[in-house]
Image: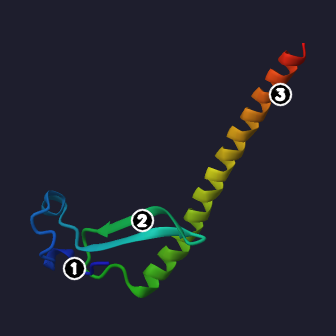
Amino acid sequence: MLDDATAQTDFIADLYFIQQQPKSLLCTSMLNQGKIIGLLYLENPLTIGAFTSDRTEVIQLLYTQAAISLENARLYQESQNYGQQLERSLQELEQAQL
């Protein structure tokens, strides 16, 4: 988290920072059951210190729910793929029996 990104010299030569001039930054990994499943990057170009502890707590609750949703979507896709694979195997077995 950077409360005042304009005061940081680490990114002074970065083209994005030069063009966008973000004031507050928050970057964190999205975890679900101890596994990183995504990255959350937020910036505020208007306010220094925009990401207070109260706001980051709410953001953490929201991205935790988002991480769970992403994991559920991945599991659903895997189950759909497995179902299609089983269906193809059943069709191949029926063809072999004929």
Q: How busy is the neighbourhood of tag 3: few (under 14 within 10 Å), some, or many (20 plus)?
A: few
The three-letter code of the residue at mark 3 reads: Leu
Res 83 quadrant in image: top right
In the displayed orientation, state which residue is furthest to the bottom: 53
Alpha-carbon neighbours of circle 2 within 10 Å: few (<14), some, or many (≥20)? few
Q: Nearer the viewer, residue 60 or 39?
A: 39
Q: Is residue 42 above or below residue 1?
A: above
Residue extending farthest to the left is 13
C-alpha distance separating marks 3 and 1: 60 Å
Residue type at tag 1: Asp
| Quadrant assignment, res 28 | bottom left
Residue assigned mark 2: 40
Residue 43 in the image, given as x and y percentages of width and height: 31, 68
Query: Which residue shows up at 84% across the image and 17% down it?
Result: 96
Left of 7 or right of it: where is 93? right
Do the numbered discs 2 and 1 sit on residues whose CB atoms are within 8 Å?
no
User: Is the residue marked by circle 1 packed among few (<14), some (14-19), or many (20+) residues within 10 Å?
Assistant: some
Residue 88 place in picture, x, y as percent: 76, 27
- Could you say whether the residue bearing mark 3 is in a helix, strand or loop? helix
Q: In the image, 38: left or right of 22?
A: right
**The disc label shown at residue 4, or none:** 1
| Of labels 2 and 1, the one closer to you | 2
Above or below residue 45? Residue 96 is above
Residue at mark 3:
90
What percent of the width, then of the height, locates residue 57? 49, 82
- Measuring 13% from the left and 57% from the top, which residue is drawn there? 15
For residue 46, side relative to residue 76 (left or right): left
Q: Which badge, 2 or 1, comes first in the chain's sequence?
A: 1
Depth check, mark 3 against mark 1: the one in front is: 3
SS for dot 1: loop
